[in-house]
Image (tube, rainbow, N blue to C red):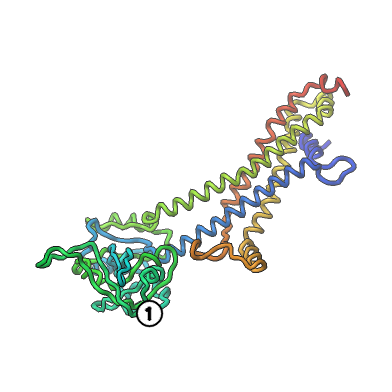
Amino acid sequence: MFKPLSLFIGLRYTGAKKHNHFVSFISLVSMIGIALGVMVLITVLSVMNGFDYQIKHRILEMVPQVTVTSWNGKVPHWQKLAADLQKKKDVVGVAPFVQGQAMITHEGVPAFGLLQGIDPSVESRVSPIAHKIIAGKLSSLQPGTFNIILGKDLAAQLGVAVGQKVTIYVPQTTMTPIGVLPRLKQFTVSGIFHVGYQFDSSYALVNYQDAATLLQLGDNVSGIQLKLNNLFLAPQVAAQLNVSLPGGLQAISWTEQNANFFSALHMEKVIMFLILLLIIAVAAFNMLSSLVMMVTDKQADIAILRTLGISTRTIMMTFVVQGAVIGIIGTVIGLIGGVILSLNVTHVINAIQKVFHVQFLSANVYYINFVPSQLRFDDVWHVCLIAIVISFLATLYPAWRAGKVKPAEALRYE
């Protein structure tokens, strides 16, 4: 005899009846529901992983991976500090910067932005900004020229083009014979850059010496930017630097500077996971209902088996096996479908956009114009495990009901 007996009977109940070679309709519906839930969940998580990866790397192109600053906003003797930082493990580039809030005006049109003073000769070591210039050149930011390169959206807001003048106001003041006046300086627009995200609408680049002069920093800078060979090592490198840096200086990683933004991305993924998990829960509830119906339909069979000496535990395990088989097969089908769809979702969406001449994503809003996907093994493993666990839990009540069937009552009207 086939052993264990509960597995044999459970497989028979799951499969077709004597004259039908297809899976029973109830089992098939439950199986399809679980498969669809697993497939959709794997695909959506992969797409969200893709968005997370693309947004992080596009934003982090411009965000310094580690920033060394001081509590008072001034870093003295920065040349020696920069040389020492360059020798640190995992550091591949360093560059000074001067930073301050400013109001930029042109012909009476105001705009508020972040004045970023850079050294154009070394900025390419930590930032790809030189490749983002769409008009002019980064090398135009020479000390004493008071040239400025504006973000594309900021330039459009002010209505300026290369060669025109803008006036920069900073929140410092100057004592004059007629009283206290705000510090201001006229700059010449020598370039325009286009990066995306918030940089195009709020950043203005000047030479760091010109910025230091305007902000009255003297020979000091606001800080030093570091680029690493692996951006995800930034928290560890920052922690190590905070132990060895001179007093008054601190190192901040990109994870701290953008903590709220990336926390929101992570929270969005978690919430989406929980919402889509309801698809699997609904399919499992459908399976529970179908198993309860199966127990009611098989009461005579259960009674006969009990009279033949089959234990209550075996009867209960029979329906657990039936539900587990439905859950496992549905999960495997969903796994295969989810992996295939996740690996090809970008091509599928691009084909749909091409056929119907539509654009689902705007680069102005999402920073990318395609649907990205990044399949991760840990997501697949977690989804499959949860689907199987939910399927197993859905079998417990029907199995308990089957174990409570009383042979005498079940066979009374047979």
Task: Using the image as rendered, state which of residue 142 and residue 297 is in the foreground.
Answer: 142
Whether residue 359 appears in this view of the structure is yes
Q: Residue at x 28, y 63 (%)?
A: 100
Specify the quadrant that holds the C terminus: top right
408 to the left or right of 260? right
> On the image, numbered disc 1 is attached to which residue?
136
Q: Position of residue 189 (x, y in %)?
A: 33, 76
Could you tell me which residue is drawn at 59 percent across and 47 percent down?
A: 382
Picture mark count = 1
- Of residue 203 and residue 326, the one placed in the foreground of this image is 203
Residue 151 position (above or below residue 278): below
Amino acid type indicated by mark 1 = Gly
Q: Quadrant of residue 389?
A: top right
Q: Residues within 10 Å of mark 1 (few under 14, many from 20)?
A: some
Q: Residue at x 38, y 79 (%)?
A: 136
Left or right of 50, for residue 183: left
5 and 21: which one is in front?
21
**Among the 4 quarters of the image, the one containing residue 292:** top right
Residue that sits furthest to the right in the current view: 19
- Establish if 137 lies above or below 354: below
For this orientation, the residue located farthest to the left is: 177
Q: Quarter of the image containing the N terminus? A: top right
Horizontal and vertical percent position of residue 186: 25, 74
The answer to whether 111 appears left or right of 368 in the picture is left
Q: Position of residue 164 (x, y in %)?
A: 32, 78
What residue sits 18% from the left and 68% below the top? 218
Q: Considering the numbered disc 1 on the image, is that residue within a helix, a strand or a loop?
A: strand
Res 77 seen here: no
In the picture, measured across the screen, residue 198 lies left or right of residue 178, that is: right
Q: Kindly give the residue lying farthest to the front in the view shown.
A: 108
